Amino acid sequence: MPFTTLASEIWPGGHLPTLTHSFIKLLHDKGVLLRNYTQNIDGLEVLAGVPEEKIIECHGNFRSACCCDCGKTADIEHVRKSIVEDVTPPYCKSCGGLTKPDIVFFGEDLPGYFHRNIRGDTRAADLLITIGTSLQVSHSEATHKEALRSRCRPLCSHTRTMFC
Ligand SMILES: [Zn+2]
């Protein structure tokens, strides 16, 4: 499936935050949320009202874009319109290379903000709540192991819920 077809299907805007997202927002409102690490690229944590500085989107997001060739920031609205409305690849206005939302493709490294925060966060946290992951994705497993090396207590829910 071409990326533009897939991206147009999963582009955020068609879904609402769940009770789980509201729970994360509640943790923030109560002043006990250090950070929310998420594998999701749907931006629903932001939509739920969790401040962006409290969220580590391990696989990126659709709120910004850049050129795959020169790395320059691209206008996300231009990228969205090209992919979603025109169903054509968006090109960089500077170098003509392909642009894409700042999501992480398979095989790409995680964003720098993940690496800059993970160790400090797991050492500073008292409790790690893991929800909605099988821990099969390498960075979520690494996050969990990092937390286990610290004084942080893990709480891992493997139970399927109707809210996740
Ligand atoms: Zn470029």
Image (cartoon, rainbow, N blue to C red):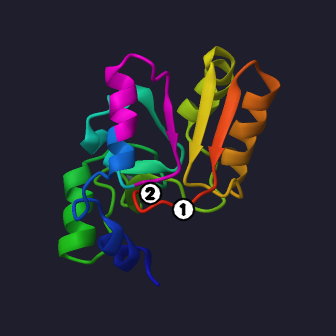
Q: Are marks 1 and 2 in contact (CB under 8 Å)?
A: yes
Neighbours of disc 1 within 10 Å: few (<14), some (14-19), many (20+): few
- Residue wearing tag 1: 160
- Compare residues 107 and 137 and report the one nearer the observer: 137
Residue at (48, 60) in percent of width and height: 161
Quadrant into which the C terminus falls: bottom left
What segment carries the magenta color? 23-41
In the picture, the disc for residue 164 is 2
In-image side of 87 versus 112 (left or right): left
Magenta-drawn stretch contains 24: yes
Question: Where 103 falls versus 89 (above or below)?
Answer: above
Neighbours of disc 2 within 10 Å: few (<14), some (14-19), many (20+): few
In-image side of 16 versus 118 (left or right): left
Residue at (36, 60) in percent of width and height: 96
Question: Where 69 falls versus 72 (above or below)?
Answer: below
Residue at (82, 26) in percent of width and height: 149
In whole angstroms, how far apart are the C-alphas of marks 1 and 2? Answer: 7 Å
